[in-house]
Amino acid sequence: MQQQKETATFGIDEARRVLGEVFAPWVMDLNLSIEGFDCDPPQGAPDWQPGAVLRMPFSERLCRNGGIISGQALMAFADTAMVIANLAANRGYRMMTTVDQTTHFMKAASASDVLADARVVRLGRTMSFGRVTLSSAADNKPVAMVSSAFAML
């Protein structure tokens, strides 16, 4: 996919299109959906950060023994969510690659969809830094906290 120029009309529909076009087929097998996409700050929100909210539906295929969603699936989900958050910060698609990702697992997730609230903390010319909160959709309790860095290509 070619890099797009920044447009004022880039929004959730374009982000959904990118989600379906740029990721590896096995990432698409996670059946992720974009539920929220924030590229414009609301009035009077000085601490606002661009980002996105994604959902990973529960599937037995993602579970390890004991019915717990595997850490590998959660980390891939967080990485993908951060790419979508970078779309919001850049107001369009831009080639990037993950440089670093640190995940702190807080609670097992089982028998529930997982939500990712991904936010870009700082966007520079060549690097982007962000955080993702993964939460169980069943009780909205945090499952993991993720920090990441991306190189903008």
Image (cartoon, grey):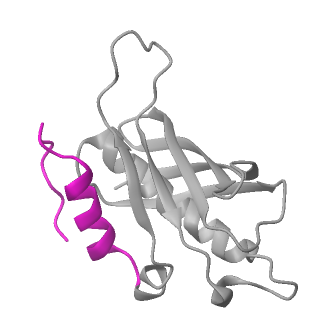
Image point (42%, 48%), residue name: 85
Task: Please state if 122 lies on the left or on the right of 144 as rendered.
Answer: left
Query: Where residue 132 sits: x, y (%)?
Result: 60, 48
- Residue 13 occupies quadrant: bottom left
Query: Where residue 109 sits: x, y (%)?
Result: 76, 66
Q: Furthest-front residue in view?
A: 138
Image point (41%, 65%), residue name: 33
Q: Furthest-top residue in view?
A: 44
> Camera-side residue: 9 or 148?
9
Query: Where residue 92 sits: x, y (%)?
Result: 23, 49
Residue 7 in magenta stretch? yes
> Camera-side residue: 121 or 145?
145
Task: Please state if 54 lies on the left or on the right of 105 as rendered.
Answer: left
> Camera-side residue: 146 or 2?
146
Residue 28 in magenta stretch? no
Query: Where residue 80 sits: x, y (%)?
Result: 48, 64
Image point (42%, 81%), residue name: 28
Q: Furthest-right residue in view?
A: 66
Q: Which residues are magenta?
A: 1-24
> Camera-side residue: 150 or 41?
41
Image point (33%, 43%), residue name: 88
The N terminus lies in quadrant: bottom left
Q: Is residue 40 above or below residue 97?
A: above
Q: Is residue 29 above or below residue 135?
A: below
